[in-house]
Image (tube, helix red, strand yellow):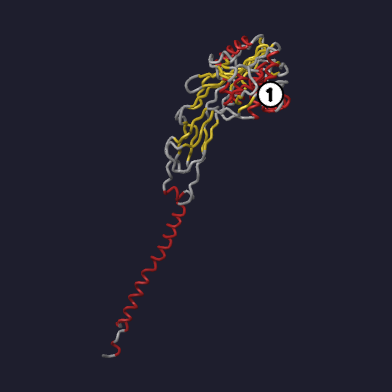
Amino acid sequence: MPINNYRRDSHPYNHYRHRHYSQTKSKKPWVFLVVPVLFLVAACIFLYVQPIGSLPPKTKSLYTPASQKVNIAWPTASQAAIGSVDQGLLAVKPGQTTKPTASTAKLISALTILNKKPISYGQQGPKITLTQSDVDIYNQYFAKDGSVVQIKVGEQLTQYQLLQGMMLPSANNYADSLAVWAFGSLEKYQQAAQAYVNSLGLKNTKVGTDASGFDASTTSTAEDLTKLAVVAMKNKTLAEIVNQPQVDLPIAGVKENTNWLLGADGVVGIKTGHTTEAGGVYVFASKYDYDKSHSAMIVGAVQGEPIVINAIHQSRLLISQAKNNYKLVSVAKKGQAVAVYTSPWGESVNAVAAKDLSILKWNSTKLKPEIKLGYIDAPAKKGTKVGVIKAGDESSDIILQHTLQQPDWQWRILRYF
């Protein structure tokens, strides 16, 4: 075969090279397309997984009723004041002056002693053995025609029983004996008691030479005595004692509570008092049940009536008037929008009151509900607790009215553009 008839591309190897080159050349455009696509996919995934961020609430205004004038017909012959355990001092008769407290001073004694020697609620406290010194105290008060409860040397009484004896039958000797036991002497008790009332902000109260109030040197005002009543009713042990109609003591036997109004007009305490110098004094606490869900613990004091019966009578009038100066006010209705959460992707959900919220409001008190709300993260289910509304001692949870959904994938990727 002639040489010039030989074709170079007819060689098998050359044919293979030509085919492989053609295939490789045809694949290169796809490489340049795949890389950008992979980069775009990676960028979309990166943008998608970025945090959405928590959503802040936008609070809505709640109705706030205006305060109203308080109308109280004060006693003419004495000074008086009204308060509540929840709100403190509420109304005071003008022109208060310091006067002897009589046996209502035992509130100071009981609180000062419990401050020094606290008793856990439901407990009796330590046993105290009475000595000849305690009998001497008894004899001194007996000779002065003071209120006493019989004792004997070697008798053992718990701290709780001594508190019962001084608060219910108003035993002057129990008050002094317990004060000496707690502080070592009446002088040291006086110093401690004065420091205690000062710490309560009772600027017009002076603690005298005894713990019973029999001596006229313990003086105060109806305003201060009302503030003292608030503190007394917050002490569970003392509040329990003053609500007891009687006490059965080892030697003296059964002794009645001198507070004969106990159980009437919602009265659950606190202390009567009467001496020649002080006249009739009464510090009271009365539970006012407006309905099954709303109540108030009204406290107050009447000081300087001719006799204690008059002071108690005036207190009944004050309790009745105090009730008339309370109104039930609606703060929020169940399902009422309290706030709204709005998302950047255009979805919003209301935060609503989980239940009806109302409060028993004293007329002159300004009602300012407190709303506490937190941030939320999507998704958040319907009924999720996001905060609380508080008004006085009443409160309601704040929950989501609907479910807050997550944003769709388009928004999560395109939100930055």
Q: Which residue is at 33% across, 81% downward?
A: 14
Residue count near mark 1 (Cα–Cα under 10 Å), binned few <14, some 14–19, many ≥20: some
Front residue of 389 and 192 = 192
> Looking at the rendering, which quadrant does residue 10 occupy?
bottom left
Position of residue 160 relative to residue 407, above or below, is above
**Helix, strand or loop under label 1:** loop
Front residue of 109 and 101 = 109
Q: Where is residue 130 in the image (x, y as percent from the top left)?
A: 65, 24
Marker count (numbered): 1
Judge from the rendering whether residue 273 lies leftward or rightward of residue 289; answer left or right: right
Judge from the rendering whether residue 106 lies leftward or rightward of residue 122; answer left or right: right
> Looking at the rendering, which quadrant does residue 277 occupy?
top right
> Looking at the rendering, which quadrant does residue 26 occupy?
bottom left
Front residue of 3 and 277 = 277
Q: Position of residue 310 (x, y in %)?
A: 62, 9
Quadrant the N terminus occupies: bottom left
Q: Residue furthest front?
A: 154
Q: Where is residue 323 in the image (x, y as percent from the top left)?
A: 55, 16
Q: Report which residue position mark 1 lands on.
A: 202
Front residue of 97 and 416 = 97
Q: Is residue 371 visible?
A: yes
Q: Which amino acid does label 1 sit on?
A: Leu
Q: Where is residue 135 in the image (x, y as percent from the top left)?
A: 67, 20
Q: Which residue lies furthest to the bottom in this view?
A: 2
Q: Residue furthest left?
A: 1
Q: Can residue 363 be seen in this view?
A: no
Judge from the rendering whether residue 93 lies leftward or rightward of residue 379; answer left or right: right
